Amino acid sequence: MSRWALAVMTAGLISLGGAAWAQPAPAPSAPAPAPPGPPDYSKVTVTTTDLGHRTWMLQGLGGNITVAVADDGVIMVDSEFAPLHDKIKAAIGALSPQPIRYLVDTHLHGDHTGGNAAFAADGASVVAHANVKTRLAAGTFNALSGAKTPPAPAAALPTMTYDSDHLTLTLKGRKAELGHIPAAHTDGDTHVWFADANVLATGDIVSVGSRYPNIDVASGGNIKGMIAGVDAFLAMTNADSRIVPGHGPVMTRAALQDYRGVLATARDRVAGLIAKGQSEDQAVAAAPLADLDVKVGATPQASINFVRLIYRSLKS
Ligand SMILES: [Zn+2]
């Protein structure tokens, strides 16, 4: 079974485990289903995709990881779940004997930040936008299901934060340019541009593969920022760029343009229903994304969730 199929199959489990990327429960009033057990991490395999110029994508379970090797250390972007630390560390060790100097969190969700404590204990500086640290320390909740994620322990918090729109990390022979898009997937999103490799790691502002992206409106996310983020990514990249999305396979700029079209179409249709005075439930009942659901390969529940999150974005 592909990693992707595994991720899709376990998506429901993960959302109840606290990571908000998965498609959560339907209506706000619906009773929460009984929590299933956690994923079997022992069955997860970490695969490595070579992006050239000492840069790789790693995929296990959860968000994609990007790895850039310098002469004196390694920069990694995201770390999936805590129990996968040893497998991820081994996969990086197969690429370079250098220590992991920086772990960048693209945002707060547990399928991207789960390795924070363990990689920090290994000696990495954990770098994130300041809002990631604030929200991890406070605890979060899922706007659709109401599921709560408790405050993270101090050891799992970022150790180096920035609150502007930009931060550059430099190692010998490599540079990672971190950028912040306000109020997009969350209010603490960081993307990472490796100009020397023409590789962009987007975090969950871009999420593809038989799904719609999640918009964590409870953590400051908004469809308008999602689209603004994609526009920024389109401006940074060219036809030869490789784009590592938060979830799904490596993308070209053309695929990113296509993704932008899906977001903008969905936004426009929900905005049209709001303009007609329809309530959130009426907008859901109108099934405004039916053709996009087929194009994207999204489930009916995923479509409902996406309409609700866009509706709440545009109403906020
Ligand atoms: Zn996420």
Image (tube, rainbow, N blue to C red):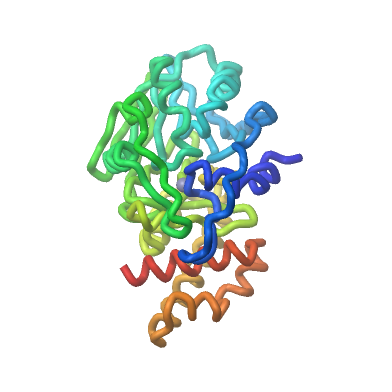
Quadrant holding the N terminus: top right
- Residue at 33%, 30% (x, y): give it: 158
Residue 195 placed where, x, y %? Answer: 43, 37
Residue 235, can we see it? no
Q: Residue 286 versus residue 168: which sits nearer the camera?
A: 286
User: Is residue 120 toward the left or the right of residue 166 in the image?
Assistant: right
- Residue at 48%, 13% (x, y): give it: 98
Numbered marks: total: 0
- Please tell me whether residue 259 is drawn above or below residue 173 in the rendered image: below
- Please tell me whether residue 213 is drawn above or below residue 240 in the rendered image: below
Instruction: Quadrant for residue 218, please give it.
Output: bottom left
- Residue at 49%, 50% (x, y): give it: 238
Q: Residue 271 versus residue 282: which sits nearer the camera?
A: 282
- Residue at 59%, 18% (x, y): give it: 90
- Please tell me whether residue 263 is drawn above or below residue 121 in the rendered image: below
Residue 185 placed where, x, y %? Answer: 41, 53
